[in-house]
Image (cartoon, rainbow, N blue to C red):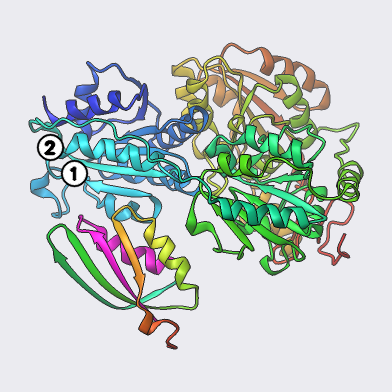
Amino acid sequence: MHRLTIDLADLEGALLRLLGTTERRGWRAVAVHARSHADRLAVDLTVRGTGRIDLLTRQLSRLHEVAHVHVAPELREVSA
Amino acid sequence: MNAAEALVMALVNEGVDTVFGYPGGAILPFYDALVDAPLRHILPRHEQGAAFAADAYARVTGNVGVCVATSGPGATNLLTGIANAMADSVPLVALTGQVPSSVLGTDAFQEVDIVGMSMPVVKHNVLVRDPNDVPRAIHEAFHIARSGRPGPVLVDLPKDVLLAECTAVAEPLAPAPVPAPCAAALDRALELLGAAERPLIYAGGGVRIAGASAELRAFVAASGIPTVCTLQALGSLPADHPLFLGMLGMHGLKAANYAVQSCDLLLVVGARFDDRVTSKLATFAPDARVVHLDVDPAEVGKRREPDVSVLGDLRASLRGLTGPSLGSDAWRVRCATWRRDHAWHYAEDGLDGPRFLRALSEAVGPEALVACDVGQHQMWVAQHWQLFDPRHHLTSGGLGAMGYGLPAAIGAQLARPDARVVCVSGDGSIQMNLQELATLSRYGLPIAVVVLDNQCLGMVRQWQELFADRRYSEIDLSDNPDFVRVADAFGLDTVRVDQLEDVPEALSRVAGTTRPLLVHVRLQREANVWPFVPPGAPNHHMMDRSAPQPAVQEKP
């Protein structure tokens, strides 16, 4: 499991796009916490999967709304 | 000014001259504004035709294509075309009407959540809820569609928003700069290239998208590295270039696949290790170190981890690598030998697809544009058409959408009215968007539509023959209509090619037509596309006409 912290613009559909991309790329979102403040959305996303997390971060970073994706170091490579 | 008029003004300010669309209730305000606008509107007979034509218009011009549809079924009919643009990284803006804001979410007439539905197949999309956001949303859509790795953007516009007053003003956004490649990465790439005995270039659609053909040709000339191309890159290196080994992959040329399997360094230029290219990934280019040049960071390491990646502008990256001669002469001789020994040999007698397409390609010349549908004929075009410019080849590569060819040819001809445009289709594919013959006729486009008719779904038939013990299932199209009579009814000129003797006149008619023309070519049902790498096999395990069974071959 990996925990990602994501900063994205709080635009209509942004969270749906983030989660949809995550699942289409082969990851299971097992926990999501999203908090809106001003025009930003701060998302803590825990995912499970067998792929490379750096590839998912690059795929999420391509989304127009996404400003930053960070892999929380304390959960890096924690087994499922 | 209402928002629909502001929308039209934003399109004009973006430099748009042509839009492809189909009117309907929710998008009516846009069509009203269009009456007074300096925009050419092309009316296909199905929204999918609009999306494919806009896609081809974008591929040929290098600009953003624009398609328009109303809400509900109009919007959903665009989806395949939008997915096609996404799969092949084509800059496209799709404008859809939406039901009025007051009834959104109430299952209103012709209401679908097109933003939700299209989300997986767009680079971005947006529902505009405020009329004053319309100009900015349009300019952002164009900016996103053409920036970095291009792709489609959908803008959904409720009818009341389009009708409301818009006082906002917005300007086109400056193009996002393409990052320059990192000098250290280029140095490391040159180090690996310099150490390689058997380097090979694997060029992909990114070369066309980046407009990097000239840089690729200069790099090949300087380095002397043999080159293979994906379906989307064909023409990046001229078909007759001595270092061009052909298309690689499932229906690639033997020389190309042997070279991939034998190289010790693979220079990947704007390609993505697609499964149709690699077949069994673990055995693809097994001895090669990989240098990957790309503009999209998400492609690096997606299917194969490179030894060095160079991110950024392909043209700059190629220029940064251009200089020394690279690789050994022995390797060049080996590749040239494969190229010579596995060159195409065309049957002297009988009418077959490859021979006909090679002759047609020569008849229309190197400046002609060819739009394909999907199936056996698509692979024959890739193998046998002589391409000298990647913008001359329009094909649905990533999505593999039957029905692309005819509307794509329409988009291409409208983009290049001076060019000879040929649509190569099959009897299955042409019926996916057959109604667009009416569009051809309406605008008097001198496109030659060549239907290679084997009375079946040939590629599916081939798979069932080879891998399902000839248990043919739902591939028969022997009850096809008479395509010549159909075309005649749509107002096209027509030619029948039933035997070899009919070919010269057909070629002459295609090369000289000034009107829409349909050429019906009757082929044998049992024709197959060779070579063929069976699914799951390494790329050097190619079946061919002389060995039409899956067989293990020694590595070349």
Chain label for disc 2: B
* Horizontal side of residue B431 vs B540, given as left or right: left
Residue A69 appears in the rendering: yes
Are dots 1 and 2 on a single chain?
yes
Q: Position of residue B486 (x, y in %)?
A: 55, 26
At 73% from the left edge and 25% from the top edge, which residue is drawn? B360
Q: Is residue A15 magenta?
A: yes
Tell me where residue B494 sits by quadrant.
top right
Q: Relative to B506, does residue A31 appear above or below in the rendering? A: below
Chain label for disc 1: B
Q: Type of residue at label 2?
A: Pro
At 52% from the left edge and 20% from the top edge, which residue is drawn? B416
Quarter of the rendering occupied by the N terminus of chain B: top left
Viewer-proximal residue among A1 and B197: B197
Residue at the extreme bottom of the image, as rendered:
A79
At 68% from the left edge and 16% from the top edge, which residue is drawn? B511
* Horizontal side of residue B47 vs B345, given as left or right: left
Residue B42 appears in the rendering: no
Give the residue at mark 1: B128
At 27% from the left edge and 42% from the top edge, which residue is drawn? B155
Q: Type of residue at label 1?
A: Val
Q: Position of residue B175 (x, y in %)?
A: 37, 36
Q: Relative to B263, does residue B223 appear above or below in the rendering? A: above
Q: Position of residue B129 (x, y in %)?
A: 14, 45
Mark 1 and mark 2 residues within 8 Å of each other at the beta carbon: yes
Q: Position of residue B508 (x, y in %)?
A: 73, 15
Q: Secondary structure at mark 2?
A: helix
Q: Callout 1: few (<14), some (14-19), or many (20+) C-alpha neighbours within 10 Å?
A: many
Viewer-proximal residue among B524 and A72: A72
- The numbered disc on residue B131 is 2
Q: Relative to B170, does residue B72 appear above or below in the rendering? A: below
Task: Read off the magenta span.
Answer: A1-25
